[in-house]
Amino acid sequence: MAPVFDDGNPTHPNSPAGVPGPQRRRARTIVSAAAAVTMTLVSCTSPSFLDGAGQSTTVVLDASGASGGSDDTSRTVTVPVYWTGSGDSTQQLFRESLTVQGSGTADPIDTAVQAMTQATPDEAEQRTLWRPVSGIGTSYTDDTITVDLPATAVSRHLERPQARLAIQQLTNTAVAAAIDAGLADPQSPPAVRILVDGAGDATVFGSYRVPDQVSYDEDSADNDVKTTSTGIQATGPTQG
């Protein structure tokens, strides 16, 4: 069953703590000859959800590595994907809505995470920190999303702040996909458990040990990342 997406839902948790009522998202619109894409700068203490359409180009996912083989059927859905964008000394998360063609049996979380690793952001200065993979396992039980990735997804080397940001990129993508599909309550976003080749407590990107569970827009003094009003900002060195 194809999910219904509503990025404009005012019940999404997009208001800063202590501020009642829905907040207007600060957005910028990038207009090209092909389409208009609305990109929203993420506030870590107040996850943002897009108002507007995604890319006009359909991203076709490679499902060749999926367990159980390829599926003869396909469907086209719109899913939220988070990208990273860097400045001189900061790195931030941005959200984009992508139109994706994938397996007819894939769940929206699986589809969004695959798109996060395989697709290309509309903005040249944005990117994904993950290697492209298609063999992803996802489940959602007891208010926890579990994402099982192959080791190739985390095989590149990243400095610890970037690796931490990559984990948040995946977490935000998975949770936003569940919320947009009506699988999760936007007022109580689920946590995400990340496995690598079926195992937890993994060290990813050669520098960062993944916590047992990661919260949506988590902020911790222990992970070299702090939240600001404009996004996730790395406090340690940021090397490519």
Image (cartoon, rainbow, N blue to C red):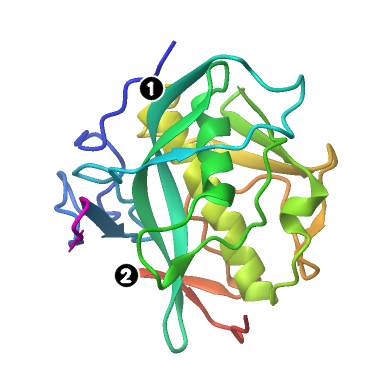
In terms of depth relative to the viewer, which is nearer, 58 or 144? 58
Residue 182 circle label: 1
Q: Residue furthest front?
A: 33
Residue 55 circle label: none
From this viewpoint, is residue 105 visible? yes
Residue 30, magenta (yes or no): yes
Three-letter amino acid code at disc 2?
Thr
Q: Residues within 10 Å of mark 2 (few under 14, many from 20)?
A: some
State the residue at coordinates (18%, 57%): 33
In terms of depth relative to the viewer, which is nearer, 47 or 39? 39
Image coordinates of residue 238 in percent, x first then y, are 59, 83
Residue highlighted by disc 2: 230
Q: Please say if 236 is above or below 38.
A: below
In terms of depth relative to the viewer, which is nearer, 109 or 194? 109
Q: Residue furthest top?
A: 1
Quadrant occupied by the C terminus:
bottom right
Quadrant occupied by the N terminus:
top left
Q: State which tag comes first along the sequence, 2 or 1.
A: 1
Quarter residue 155 falls in: bottom right
Three-letter amino acid code at disc 1?
Gly
The region drawn magenta spans 29-35
